[in-house]
Image (tube, rainbow, N blue to C red):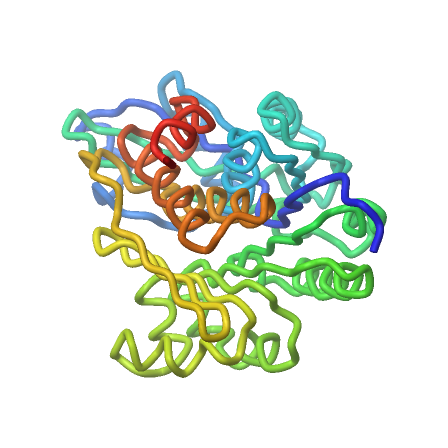
């Protein structure tokens, strides 16, 4: 097997997060329910974006957050995701590259703008989100850089992107390329609603031996297994994948590889905003795995990264993750 150039290459929705302060009166005027998340169309995305106050922008999306976390931990990360040739598309490209993530997907005009998540934060710290998926849902097979995939030790795929047909075909092709090159494929189930829509497809991926590392949280593993009991669900999935990683919020996380099982407690932290917790946990675990660390050490790295990101607003680390790991992983 040839040497790798990237430790983790992630594929997912390329979304720009736009975060702005708002008061309750603004939410009422816009007909928004505080603390909710809704999907919106092009017209509403443009209208609300223009109505919002001055916002803070950041490249986002679940797998993109993971790639950024991997880079923050000093590992080599890349990301594949579709943006449009517009202002937010240019911002996404510049921002994710500034974080040390390799991003080579060319902007493409699908007659729909770059995806954005418009986040309104009220004085009580509640986040009201309106998400427009736009160009992100049109990632074609032709956007893949096959050599980039072959050069990556781990291909990491976001379950959220399984919904639209074009990106699903792109991810299936990416899996074929990675496996033919002897690389590992990691998959995150992303959300219980994703599993409800694609349970058969996800199970087929697993049973066909396409997935080497499966990430899930407690609800997702139970949804995939179709049983409302954690250990029963884990028991029904663990022998179907080489490595199963399950997060349990304040109860910590587990990893199972064959007969080996490791568990860690959640890191002590004052929770401010849980956005990005799973994304950064995956980043920490994958960075540790790429460094050939033990399951327990990789889980600890995930827990430390997740704890940092939930200690403040936003889905990107603010502290030096590499230094945090060095301090705490002794």
Q: Residue furthest front?
A: 330
Relative to 59, does residue 108 appear above or below in the rendering? below
- The residue located at (50%, 59%) in the rendering is 188
Q: Which residue lies furthest to the left in this view?
A: 124
Q: Residue furthest top?
A: 54
Q: Where is residue 12 in the image (x, y as percent from the top left)?
A: 59, 49
Taking depth in this image into account, of 45 and 182 the one nearest to the observer is: 182
- The residue located at (28%, 28%) in the rendering is 312
Q: Position of residue 5 (x, y in %)?
A: 76, 39
The answer to which image quadrant residue 35 occupies is top left
Q: Position of residue 313 (x, y in %)?
A: 31, 29
Residue 71 relative to residue 2: left or right: left
Q: Where is residue 76 in the image (x, y as percent from the top left)?
A: 65, 35
Relative to 290, does residue 89 appear above or below in the rendering? above
Taking depth in this image into account, of 66 and 181 the one nearest to the observer is: 181
Relative to 52, does residue 130 appear above or below in the rendering? below
The answer to which image quadrant residue 88 occupies is top right
Relative to 51, does residue 237 appear above or below in the rendering? below
- The residue located at (22%, 56%) in the rendering is 251
Residue 327 relative to residue 172: left or right: left
Quarter of the picture holding the C terminus:
top left
Residue 273 visible in image:
yes
Residue 28 visible in image:
no
């Amino acid at each position: 097997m040839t040497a790798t150039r990237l430790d983790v290459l992630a594929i997912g929705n390329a979304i720009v997060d736009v975060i702005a302060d708002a008061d309750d009166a603004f939410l009422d005027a816009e007909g928004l329910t505080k603390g909710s998340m809704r999907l919106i169309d092009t017209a509403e995305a443009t209208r609300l974006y223009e109505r919002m106050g001055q916002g803070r922008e950041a490249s986002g999306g679940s797998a993109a957050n993971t790639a950024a976390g991997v880079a923050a931990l000093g590992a080599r990360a890349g990301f594949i995701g579709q943006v449009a040739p517009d202002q937010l598309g240019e911002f996404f490209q510049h921002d994710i590259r500034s974080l040390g993530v390799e991003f080579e997907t060319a902007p493409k005009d699908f007659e729909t703008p770059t995806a954005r998540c418009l986040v309104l934060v009220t004085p009580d710290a509640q986040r009201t989100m309106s998400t427009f998926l736009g160009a992100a849902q049109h990632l074609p097979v032709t956007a893949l850089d096959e050599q980039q995939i072959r050069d990556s030790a781990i291909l990491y795929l976001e379950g959220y992107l399984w919904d639209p047909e074009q990106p699903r075909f792109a991810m299936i092709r990416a899996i074929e390329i990675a496996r033919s090159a002897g690389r590992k494929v990691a998959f995150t189930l992303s959300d219980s609603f994703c599993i409800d829509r694609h349970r058969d497809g996800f199970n087929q991926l697993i049973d066909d031996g396409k997935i080497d590392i499966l990430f899930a949280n407690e609800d997702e593993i139970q949804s995939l297994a179709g049983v409302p009991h954690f250990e029963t669900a884990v028991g029904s999935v663990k022998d179907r994948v080489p490595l199963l990683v399950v997060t349990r919020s304040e109860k910590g996380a587990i990893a199972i590889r064959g007969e080996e099982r490791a568990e860690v407690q959640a890191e002590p932290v004052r929770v401010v905003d849980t956005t990005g917790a799973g994304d950064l946990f995956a980043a920490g675990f994958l960075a540790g795995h790429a460094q050939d660390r033990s399951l327990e050490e990789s889980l600890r790295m995930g827990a430390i990264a997740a704890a940092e990101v939930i200690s403040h607003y936003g889905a990107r680390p603010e502290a030096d993750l590499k230094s945090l790991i060095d301090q705490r992983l002794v």
